[in-house]
Image (cartoon, grey):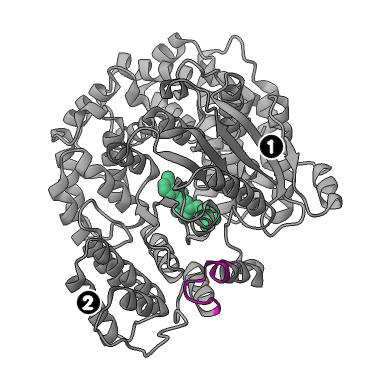
Amino acid sequence: MAESPLKQAVLTAGSLAAGLSARRRKVGEVTLDPQTADCAQEIRNMLRQDDVSPEVAQDVVRALSAFGKMRILHTQVLNVLRDLPESTWKESFSLSMMVEAISSYAEFQLEDPEFNQVLAGLIVSRGLKHVKAFELAKLVFAAASLELGDFEGVYATFLEAFRNTDMTRLGSFDLCRCLWSLARLRPHTGGGKLVVEAKPLAKALARKRGIFGPSLAQAVWALPRLGLSDDVEKILEVSSGAVLAPGDQAQQLRRLAESCESPGLQAAVLNAAALRYTKVKDFAKCNEIFEYMAEKDLWTPVSYALAKRVGSHVQGSPPLPGMRTPGPKAHKYVRALYHALSRAKPLDAQSALAGLEHFSRISSRNWLKFGAADEKGKVLEDAWATHGQKKEDCLAVEFGTFLGYSAVKMQQQLGDGSRVISFEMDPEVACLALNFIEFVGLSDVIEVRIGQCEDLVDNLKEELEPGSVDVVYMDHNQMTYHRDLAQLQQSRLLSREVLFAATQCLKPGAPLLLWQLVQERKVDVWSALEIVSCPDCGFNRMEDWVVLARGAAKTRSLKRREPKNLRTAPPRDLVLLAAECNLMRWRTAKGMVDEKLWDEFVQYVRRGMERAGISNTRENWPDQKWFDAARKLEYQRLDY
Ligand SMILES: C[S@@+](CC[C@H](N)C(=O)[O-])C[C@H]1O[C@@H](n2cnc3c(N)ncnc32)[C@H](O)[C@@H]1O
């Protein structure tokens, strides 16, 4: 029997995706090539939202899976899936098909709580009897990514499936994902009590070799949350990578230094460990590190500055000013730090900031992601300086430290007496920032905390009084800005007149944050909301938006700042736009997106936001000509 035209097009999509997975095709070709475009277009024309037969529903899942692998957002396919009747899910889909559908859907990270509820209900009502190990690994990761643990019965359903399925033959990638997913799905009330279902996974993982990178980070994050803290040490012994576990960070940084490739990074990590010891006044350990560094000729200008500050007697080597270049195999970020140190005067923040900016401008290969430089920097500086004049002793919280550039800038603008707590999830990057901050003499007022911001906010809540945070600056992951702000609001950490600032809101874009702020402005959570259009740092006609929101002082009770009940769900188009922004980030990481495409894409994002009633309130461009040119650009959509 001849295949239907829809099935044929879906098969073509499948083979295009398979070519991508097998690396027969370059990623760029798959999303840009006319064959993919035609195939996606054909599927779009043939799919009707109403009256989807069971066969067509299965084709929809296969198409979703193919486009998911290519990270192409096919709106029509997603919409049809969303509207499938429950009976189709329950009666026409095998368990494997359901797993494929949910895991492919989760790739797009759409913010759709209603549909999530439907998916949660399906998992619970169907149960996961006789699920295969690799399918369970896929599904639990999808469920955790979609945060389905918030729905009743989901966590229990997965626990039962883990009890009944032998997962021990899975590879370390899947085992780490399973542990992370279980910890993520677990209700908060569970604390760190043992989850027996996770024990065999941890045991199997400890037998593996070569766990590294994000997988290692997942496991180290998850194990203590599953009551398996003792297994962290075992896993770290058989793995390598820049990951910190809970506990003595200075000790762990010393271990991390051993795996650093370049002497420059090794020295920076050891300096950071010494700094951690000085914080707790353990000068003996600090000197131990200095001695080790002298033996290996690893002293840098930062080591000298720190030794002087703490009155250490250890003789440095190489002699003053110490190692000034990071040596071979140094990553761009390490080179940036040493470049800045070699050009700047010690204890002089302005010259150190200028040193980093200079590095970023030397060539396009040196470009660094600073969301607070140039015109955007000016907007932020003015806002911070004004806020600092109104309120002495400001406490600021920063999401995304990177090299410490914006943390230093913010502290300087907020003025004497101000403090910054900055969150950074990458331990090596955090160490570079710690060196930069020590060199400019601000270690006492800028604290870098290493970890995921979500966890660090939780810790902060335990530590600070309600209303303690006067300034927030976000420059980490635009996909989560809105959730991170909501978490802060619910934590009650924000002061009544808090200044909230975020950069990169148009590039790659944070549509859901902007939606939230605009809604909250309408009900006076914020007394002012500014959306400032500027060129992105280092580019002529790439538009970006910086957002400034000021808390409404007249709000009577801090409770009112909780966004519950104020939430108006964002329109579907905006949710899809947010997903497209994220897919663009993915494509950029794969080297598919050049400057011109970004210039065009941000205009597409801007128009999408404007359709949802979100526009910039002012502009700060050095040259009107570039602004006008930027605004005329059109984006050829890769998504359908
Ligand atoms: C663009 S850089 C920040 C630049 C910095 N604010 C500056 O201008 O100097 C983003 C940083 O955020 C960090 N980051 C991303 N997601 C994070 C998260 N969930 N928690 C903590 N840090 C995160 C990244 O590792 C990266 O170093």
Tag nearer the camera, 2 or 1: 2
> Based on the displayed image, in which of its 4 quarters is residue 50 positioned?
top right
Which mark sits nearer the N-terminus, 2 or 1?
2
Left or right placement of residue 636 versus residue 9 in this view: right
Residue 395 in the figure: left or right of residue 242 = right
- The residue that appears at 21% across and 50% down in the rendered structure is 205
**Where is 256 relative to 227, above or below?**
below
Q: Residue at x 40, y 88 (%)?
A: 320
Indicate the position of residue 343 as horizontal and vertical percent values: 55, 78
Magenta range is 343-353
Left or right, residue 122 beside residue 595: left
Residue 435 percent coordinates (x, y): 41, 68
Which secondary structure lies at badge 1? helix
Q: Which mark is residue 92?
A: none
Measured from the top left, where is residue 290 in percent x and y?
A: 26, 79
Q: CA distance from mark 2 to mark 1?
A: 53 Å
Which is nearer the eye, 637 or 88?
637
**Tag 2 residue:** 287
Instruction: Tell me which amino acid carries mark 1.
Output: Val
